[in-house]
Amino acid sequence: MSFAFIGILLLIVTRSFAADVDPLTRWIDVNGLRIHYLEAGRGNAGDPVILMVHGYLATSEDFRSLMLSLPTQYHTIALDLPGFGLSAKPNAAYDTPYFVAFLRSFAIAKKLTRFDLIGHSLGGKISTQFTYRWPGFVNRLILIDSFGLNVEEQPWAGLQQLGTNVDAGFLKNAPGNANQEKNRATARITKNMIGQDPIDGILPHIKQRTLLLWGDTDPVLPFHWSESFRSLLPNVRFYMITGVGHVPQSDKPDVVKQLVVSFLAS
């Protein structure tokens, strides 16, 4: 067997392996938890950082298309919160204080001292609570089809009110520890985040400039609910994204990119 043939074989194997490796995937230990996140950008010191927080029953994948469409001068990070995606699913409370505290711990672990914060759906509620609790971390806030108003919480509150029955429903058909951990997390997130801690009262106290984006055909959080956010946020810029539902950053990443870049540059 010639050295040339061996070299070609190694090249094929190397390229095949590289194709299976997600170039955006990263892992980090936060408070003893193995946390998965995506990271993109050229990586220069001093580049503006954008931290992205996904919604209910979602993952960092909801931001992949947006991350890849943004100019590389932006250092973008989208994490799987504990209990979601590939991240650890500990025996935790999974309520608002838990996620707000975790987001701070993640920022510290990543040595992020100041960043722009994007929250989608339930991630918008978490991001708003985080901005209110730890305003020193956040330059600007971007909310996409955000959850958290009392009017939004109430239609879903029945899930929370099921109490221990929610646990039983999620855990009933979950053989194996991995599924048990995932379903336990989902049950607690459902009980402790849905119908709890509405953000109506804290929105008027958000001092950061805020960009609010909403899909006009959102079947999950109807477009008219955006009006309450617009009326309560003191320093908000609003855009309706036409022809898109609940996840505009995934369905129309180029449109969202343009709005985000324009907002951050203004």
Image: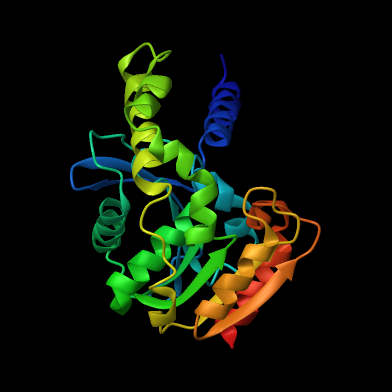
In the image, farthest residue toward the bottom: 266
Q: Is 100 left or right of 212, judged from the image as shown?
A: left
User: Which quarter of the figure has residue 135?
Assistant: bottom left
In the image, farthest residue toward the right: 243
Which residue corresponds to the image point at 75% horizontal and 61% vertical from the top-left? 216
* Placement of the N terminus among the 4 image quadrants: top right
In the image, farthest residue toward the left: 32
Which residue corresponds to the image point at 49% horizontal and 39% vertical from the top-left? 57
Could you say which is closer to the camera, residue 168 or residue 211?
A: 168
User: Which quarter of the figure has residue 6?
Assistant: top right
Residue 54 at least partly seen: no
Colour scheme in use:
rainbow
Q: How many numbered circles are shown? A: 0
Name above or below for residue 46 compared with residue 33.
Answer: below
Name above or below for residue 120 compared with residue 262.
Answer: above
Residue 75 rendering spot, x and y as whole percentages = 47, 66
User: Which quarter of the figure has residue 167?
Assistant: top left
Q: Is 127 left or right of 254, judged from the image as shown?
A: left
Q: Is 78 left or right of 216, judged from the image as shown?
A: left
Residue 261 rendering spot, x and y as whole percentages = 62, 76
Residue 122 rendering spot, x and y as whole percentages = 47, 53
Could you say which is closer to the camera, residue 181 or residue 229?
A: 229
Residue 216 at least partly seen: yes
* Placement of the C terminus among the 4 image quadrants: bottom right
Could you say which is closer to the camera, residue 248 or residue 200?
A: 200
